[in-house]
Image (cartoon, coloured by chain):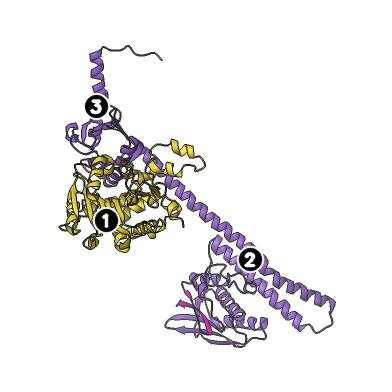
Amino acid sequence: MNVVERNNVVVKGKGSQVLMFAHGFGCDQNMWRYVAPAFEENYKIVLFDHVGAGGSDLSAFVPQTYEKLEGYADDIIDIATALQLQDIIFVGHSVSALMGIIASQKSPELFKSLVLVSPSPSYINDGDYVGGFTKPQIDELLESLDKNHLGWSMAMAPVIMGNPDKKELVEELTNSFCRTDPAIAKHFARTTFLTDKRELLSAVDLPSLILQCSDDVIAPREVGVYMHEQIKGSRLVIMKATGHCPNLSAPEETIYEIMKFLS
Amino acid sequence: MELPVSPDMNQLQENFEDFFEEALCGFIIADTQGFIRRANKKIAGWLNYRTDELTGKRFSDLLGIGSKIYYETHLRPLLRIQGFFDEVVLELSSTTGQKLQVMVNAFERRDKNGQPYFIRFTILKSSDRLQYEQNLQDAKAIAEKELIKQKEMVALREQLIAVLGHDLRNPLSAIIMAADLLVSFPEADNAQVLATLKQSSSRMKELVNNIMDFARTRLGEGIVLTRQDVLLEPVLQQVVAEMRLIYPEREIAALFKITRPINCDPDRVAQLLSNLLANALTHGDASFPVHVYAILKNENFELSVVNSGIPIPADLHEHLFAPFTRETSRASQHGLGLGLYICSEIAKAHNGTLNFTSSGNETSFTFCMSL
């Protein structure tokens, strides 16, 4: 299988030090469009789409493989291996931050440091742990996935299912960024929001930066603080940016914090 | 179209305010962080809020959990990248927890430097529309299911015809050859030729009976029993005797211990034994006898047929009782693959079971029904 096509891998930049950007649940590599260009002058930029998202090869989606984050983490290792990347600085947003941690523990020789943007090891409150969602809320989420109540099903289907022979027709449709196959999005949502990888954090021994937004309903501040406490020697930055996607809502602040960490 | 007479400016200002509050859709204006600055009466009313209560909340606070995650992870990025999104289905949650399905358009107002300024949302109720779409989806699912069923049926019928043609040809050829011999040599000792005639025509009768039963069970009403209290031993002896006639070179060892009448359909039980015996005689090792046992045990009637020889291949075990299951390696002499299917249907019709064991050098089929 051609990994580059499978994950729609894009390599840019003039430098040799590798900076690999991984998008989170709900979008694709467009997530990094305001951040990645700032590093092109001095770094080798690697962008890609997870299988099922954006321009990836949808036929490569095997439900069992991607039932767990490990399946996605293996793809990251595949990309690094296929492109012969080394000393990777991995920048992962949201659930991809955890995929990066998993990949770095599976193949430590490939990675140099981790930038974790709005990460969360587990979304469900559990005793003293604040994950951001209660068990009933997650149950409601799973139910809404089952009942097709998530917007993807209807809003996105025409875009994806649009006649592939008529590319121009697809282009004319709105909401054309961050395309996701509805069935895969549902599967990915389940994988993401049922994940509990808290036990992995204490074993992280790479230099790590945690970027935590100040008002994030997906990964609240407590989660960033928890990550910081668990990962030895990590640096935590509480950003002025709000929401879950500082890479889009506050690209300058995101770029600044990553540069500061790398220098 | 004739334009209405324009009212004076004050009147117009008043009308815009009224238009915003009393529009036929919900309007929300939020800051770039997603906090609501202003919402109209319509959307507040739908969700059971006062309009001022909505100010200061996040837009995503109004959403059900699935929609909230969808919004934060997908729509907000989309707004930032694309500047708008259109016709997106979301689920709003009212103060009483009631869910409202809506269609939302959103637009990010940007200043001349491209910096976001505020976000506008237009919200249309669409419960009926979505119900209609759901109905279409359901209807489609039902039609697809029906189509698959029909396709399977067609495949089954085609298979039936193909296999039937193939398997009737051999015994029929044998009969034609026997008839030719009788015509050419009417005076000769024809015992062997007559045995062939008997054997081949019985084989054809068995195939045709199985086909008829298959058509009834699979494409129609199932096997219908005519139950009666009957002494089974003579019935079963008759089947064994017929088989001995058809296979004169083979040994069939029968042991019957059925001391009282059994309530069953004797013709069907005979058919079951006939099918099992025919299988055992064709598949079993010809140098060993085939055993038939019929006994009463713990208030059960048990009828077993046991043969020696190579066991049934493991890959056939799971679907052994499904129609058209045949050993692929030596298929032609083995009939339609309907025999065991019909046997299991006959067992089922008697509220009984048909089980088998096949290992080492022995294969055994047992029909068991409680009395």
Q: Can see residue B118?
A: no
Secondary structure beneath label 3: helix
Q: Nearer the viewer, residue B28 or B221?
A: B28
Q: Colour of chain A?
A: yellow
- Residue holding disc 1: A113
- Residue holding disc 3: B21
Check if mark 2's residue and mark 3's residue have beta carbons within 8 Å.
Answer: no
Q: CA distance from mark 2 to mark 3?
A: 74 Å
Q: Position of residue B142 (x, y in %)?
A: 46, 50
Quarter occupied by residue B223? bottom right
Q: Colour of chain B?
A: purple
| Chain identifier of the residue bearing label 3 in the image | B
Relative placement, left or right, of B271 versus A254 is right
Quarter occupied by residue A249? top left
| Chain identifier of the residue bearing label 1 in the image | A
Segment colored magenta:
B349-370
